[in-house]
Amino acid sequence: MRVLLAVVLLVVGAGSAVAAVAVHGHWWGLALTIAAVLATLVALGPGWATRLPFAAGFGLGVLRLALGRPEGDFLVAADAPGYLLLLLALVVVAAAVATLPRPGRGRRRQHVPTDT
């Protein structure tokens, strides 16, 4: 079930990237993108199957759409809104990685005394 959730969130993150690239040229679109993506990160909570797949889908989606196309044009321009969108993608991925739970956290290790 966790794998299915991760795949769904990866697709939702990629879809959010497509929508963000489509509207980032307008001030209201960039503001809406920032608010929606950050609210989604907070709502998902940290985890390998929650926040990280969404952030990976969003970050990779923005990166893929920011690369040049074969015709020589770009979907993300080299202007302030374009750089803010790229910065947002970087911050989203960094926040998701930084808030991952540490391995072994929550499990108690028993201390077994050894007699020598």
Image (cartoon, rainbow, N blue to C red):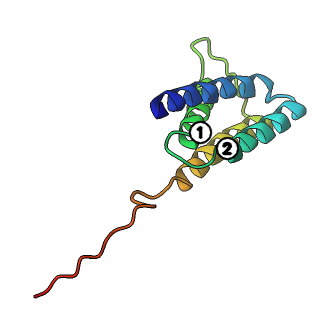
Q: Which residue is mark 1?
A: 55
**Considering only order in the chain, which callout, 1 or 2, is on the residue closer to the N terminus?**
2
For this rendering, which residue is in front, 14 or 108?
Answer: 108
- Residue lying furthest right in this view? 28
* 90 lies left or right of 83: left
Image: 108 above or below 68: below
Image: 59 above or below 38: above
> What x and y, as percent, mark residue 69?
60, 17
Give the number of the mark in front: 2 or 1.
2
**In the image, what residue occupies the spot 82% across and 28% down?**
25
The amino acid type, in three-letter code, at marker 2 is Leu
> What x and y, as percent, mark residue 104?
39, 59
> What x and y, as percent, mark residue 4?
49, 27
For this rendering, which residue is in front, 67 or 24?
Answer: 24
Residue count near mark 2 (Cα–Cα under 10 Å), binned few <14, some 14–19, many ≥20 = some
Quarter of the figure that contains the C terminus: bottom left
- Residue lying furthest top in this view? 71
CB atoms of marks 2 and 1 within 8 Å: yes
For this rendering, which residue is in front, 58 or 113?
Answer: 113
Query: Quick one: SS at disc 1?
Result: helix
Query: Quick one: SS at disc 2?
Result: helix
**In the image, what residue occupies the spot 67% across and 22% down?**
74
- Residue lying furthest bottom in this view? 116
> What x and y, as percent, mark residue 90?
62, 44
Q: Which residue is mark 2?
A: 41
Q: Quadrant of residue 27?
A: top right
The amino acid type, in three-letter code, at marker 1 is Ala
Q: Quadrant of residue 65?
A: top right
- Does the rendering let one see residue 27? yes
